[in-house]
Image: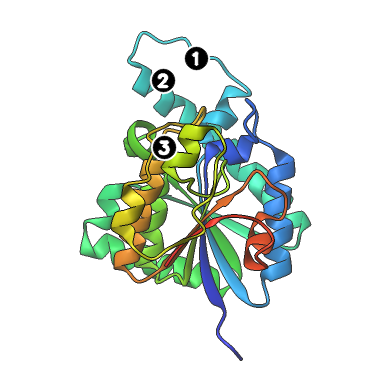
Amino acid sequence: MQKKKRILLKVGSNTLTKETDNISRGKIEDMANQIAYLQDDYEFIIVSSGAIAAAKQFVKLESKGKEITVKQALASIGQPHLIRIYQEIFREAGLLTSQCLLSYSDFEKEQSRTNIMNTINVLVDNNYIPIINENDTVATDEIKFGDNDKLGALTASLLSADLFIIATNTNGIYTKESMENGVPKTIELVEDFEDLLKQVVSSKSKHGSGGMLSKIEAASVTKKANIETWIVNGLEDNFMVNAMNNKVPFTKIK
């Protein structure tokens, strides 16, 4: 049997909500359908944001605490809802899911790294798709810094992924000049990473805490691990399959 290629798919809050205030069941269905279609050749691990967005559909928290603490509480409420939605929709597509909550400190300890690797490999070998999120109730890195881009890159590197796909709300990375002109043009292939850094326009997304800079920083992590990174417009239907068939513009970082 030919070994399946391993894809680490990172999905941000903007993609999961389709830039609304609610988790889009249709978007998760789109992801499930694509994974079901590709599963003969690829195995998937998903790093998914969206816990806070899921909670906001149900609750409005009163608090005398800091905003970051409220967000941690929202993440705690929203995470089970998010996983339930994934489970229900993926099950309909014949896919099994599991939940893994990680924090950046887990990647700094050799024993934790080994445990993560062993657990996720067992899950994937048994046809379970791990849905990974940062453990926001104890760690605040995603809330503060990077919408899980870095977590996705570290996980892809640790698990020796063949491909790291970042699903975002743009057609990849645009040239700086085209952004200034108001007519975005995708950088389709990146072979010189230093050139790419010169193209960055700093911006943050509505729901996410990242932006293009955090995606490029994530790509620099996977580059060191010799993993190709694709930055794809996850708002579009069939975004992974279309990218594989070169039907849509996206950024490929060699």
Indicate which disc, 1 or 2, sits on the residue closer to the N terminus.
1
153 lies above or below 171: below
Pointer 2 or 3: first along the chain: 2
Q: Residue at x 49, y 45 (%)?
A: 174
Q: Indicate which disc residue 210 carries.
A: 3
Image quadrant assignment for residue 155? bottom left
Tell me which amino acid carries mark 1. Leu
Camera-near label (2 vs 3) is 3
Element assignment for label 1: loop
Q: Nearer the viewer, mark 3 or mark 1?
A: 3
Is there any visible trace of residue 187 in the rendered image?
yes
Q: Residue 5 in the image: x percent, y percent?
A: 54, 76
Binning the other alpha carbons within 10 Å of mark 3 as few (below 14), some (14 to 19) or many (20 upward) gives many
SS at badge 2: helix
Q: Which residue is mark 2?
A: 70
Q: Is residue 227 above or below residue 50?
A: below
Quadrant in which the N terminus is drawn: bottom right
Give the quarter of the image for residue 110: bottom left
Q: Are marks 1 and 2 in contact (CB under 8 Å)?
A: yes
Residue 64 is drawn in which quadrant? top left
Spatial separation of the CA atoms under disc 2 and disc 3:
19 Å
Q: Identify the residue at image location x=52%, y=71%.
A: 6
Q: Distance from label 1 to label 2 (Cα)?
A: 7 Å
Residue receiving disc 1: 61
Q: Is residue 24 left or right of residue 10?
A: right
* Residue farthest toward the left in the current orientation of the protein: 109
Location of residue 182 in the rendering, given as x and y in whole percent from the top left corner: 54, 32
> What amino acid type should be assigned to the residue bearing mark 3?
Gly
Provide the secondary structure element on which disc 3 rests. Answer: loop
Relative image position of residue 11 (x, y in whole percent): 54, 47
18 vs 110, nearest the viewer = 18
